[in-house]
Image (cartoon, rainbow, N blue to C red):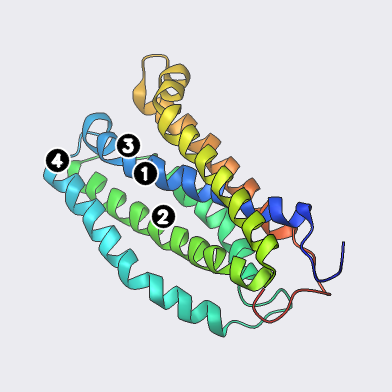
Amino acid sequence: NSPDRVSWREKLSYGIGDLACSMIFNFMSSYLFYFYTDVSGLAVGVAGTIISTARLVDAFLNPVVGVLSDRTKTRWGKLRPYLLFSALPLAAATLLVFVIPDASADTKIVYALITYLLFCIMYTVCNVPYTALMSSITEDKRDRSHLNMTKFIAASLGSLISMGLAMQLVASFGRGDEKKGCVILSILFAAMVAGVILLSFFGKRGGSRTGPGR
């Protein structure tokens, strides 16, 4: 490969990052409301308010993270560090969302709001720089089409796992205890998220082509 071209290893390591992002985003979007109401016992209105509040905060946070990442300067560039330092916190936040304690209704509400806010914040801190990273990896049209292809395939696989298999896995893991099944599944998802995002970070070469935007 020419030093200016992107290797298939780098293309795959970039694309696979969207497996984690797509998987947990779709899982939260599809099943979190059900988990709050039917599994954890929160009132429908309360669950809706928690989710809406967290997403409203997230909407304001998106441009903030974009500006901050654009001004970041490290030996890994300005975008890649966000993958490195958000991987474990995002995994932890994914798990914490589904470990609601057996406590009073007010305690559950506060816990659910704090943990889902934390998840939304860490998802944005990871996903905004990750999405922007592709434009700074290469200017070659063919390489960009390959990056888009690997990203699309990984995102589709993440959606399949989270939306096509999630409830079956919950039933299998829980063996009649839906809450237990959700916790075990969240542990699995958290481990996958951390591993995939770190793989996406470490799969890119340093030095020769890690310019200021990478």
Residue picked out by circle 3: 31
Pointer 3 or 2: first along the chain? 3
Amino acid type at circle 3 is: Tyr
Badge nearest the viewer, 4 or 3: 3
- Mark seen at residue 44: 4
Kindly state the secondary structure of the residue where label 2 is placed. helix
Residue 98 position in % (x across, y down):
38, 39
Gap between marks 2 and 1, in whole Å? 10 Å
Observer able to see residue 101: no
Q: Tell me, yes or no, whether the two marked residues, 4 and 3, touch with CB atoms within 8 Å.
A: no
Secondary structure of the residue carrying tag 4 is helix
Of residue 26 and residue 3, the one placed in the foreground of this image is 3
Helix, strand or loop at label 3? It is helix
Mark 4: amino acid: Val
Label 4–label 1 contact, CB within 8 A: no
Residue 28 badge: 1
Report if the CB atoms under discs 3 and 2 are less than 8 Å apart: no
Mark 2 → mark 4, Cα distance in angstroms = 20 Å
Residue 67 position (above or below residue 115): below
* Front of the two marks 3 and 2: 3
SS category of the residue bearing label 1 = helix
Is any atom of residue 153 visible in this view? yes
Q: Position of residue 39 (x, y in %)?
A: 27, 30
Report the residue at 38% width, 45% height from top.
97
Residue farthest to the front?
Answer: 142
Image quarter of residue 162? top left
Q: What's the CA distance linking mark 3 and mark 2? A: 15 Å
User: Which mark is first along the chain, 3 or 4?
Assistant: 3
Residue type (three-letter) at the residue carrying disc 2: Phe
The residue that disc 2 covers is 119
